[in-house]
Amino acid sequence: MNSLDTLPKPRYKRILLKLSGEALQGMESYGISLSVLETISEEIVEVNALGIETAVVIGGGNIFRGVAGAATGMDRSTADYMGMLATVINALALQDSLERMGILTRVQTALEIKQVAEPYIRRRAIRHLEKGRVVIFAAGTGNPFFTTDTAATLRALEIGADVILKATKVDGVYDRDPVKYEDAIKFEELSYMEVLRKELKIMDATAISLSMQGNIPIVVFNLFERGNIKRIIMGEEIGTTVRSG
């Protein structure tokens, strides 16, 4: 037997990584931490080296939080559009970081901003992935009243991703906040219906329902433990997996 045949093979071929905007701010009160941005980029580079087709959706909370005071009392649609623009800033920052590490990257936005990014076109996104480029989806769904979690699930289904990797600051899903409660119980696996029934705050209900309809698993994991993304892709049971019961 060829020794190459005994090497472990990746569990997933195409992934969608969901990052919160807050993940990029590190210890700052808002904005982008360059050290955190670099760490996340290094994780993505490792995955790209395995030949894994990687798409990313980033939230905008780290930037929008800085102007949230001004949005108080603002029309909800206007505030949501401001949040979408914040995700574009994060996407451009991640693109720059990845490209400085030698990874070809494309940003596609649901809002048309031709000067800085491509418009979201499903077939073009898939073609980029097939060519080994990292694709970053920005501006959510392009519609107010929808979260970036919902946008991540929608994009994952549209591009035919094998899994959604939901990056968090803890090592999985618990029955209550593990930071506040030492006796919080971690779930190794959950069904979509259990997440909805228990009202666990993994993603919003729309995102979970979409995942259930598309039967795409969600892995919730600690982003800040180095190598976790690669471990998940190679088949290790990291964090909490949400799938059909």
Image (spheres, rainbow, N blue to C red):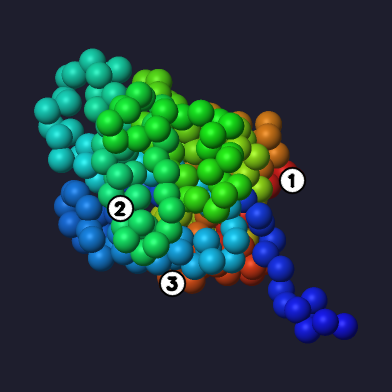
SS for callout 2: helix
Q: Which is more toward the observer, 40 or 79?
A: 40
Q: Earlier in the sequence, mark 1 or mark 3?
A: 3
Name the quadrant of the N terminus: bottom right
Neighbor class of circle 2 (other Cα within 10 Å; few <14, some 14-19, many 20+) is: some
What numbered label is drawn on residue 245?
1
Q: Given the image, on which type of amino acid does mark 3 rest?
A: Arg
Q: Which mark is residue 96?
A: 2
Quarter occupied by residue 88: top left
Label 3 secondary element: loop
Q: Nearer the viewer, mark 2 or mark 1?
A: 2
Residue 65, horizontal then vertical, whole percent:
20, 40
Q: Is residue 75 above or below residue 92?
A: above
Amino acid type assigned to the residue bearing label 2 in the image: Asp
Instruction: Residue at 36% x, 25% y: name it.
Output: 111
In the image, 208 versus 103, the foreground residue is: 103
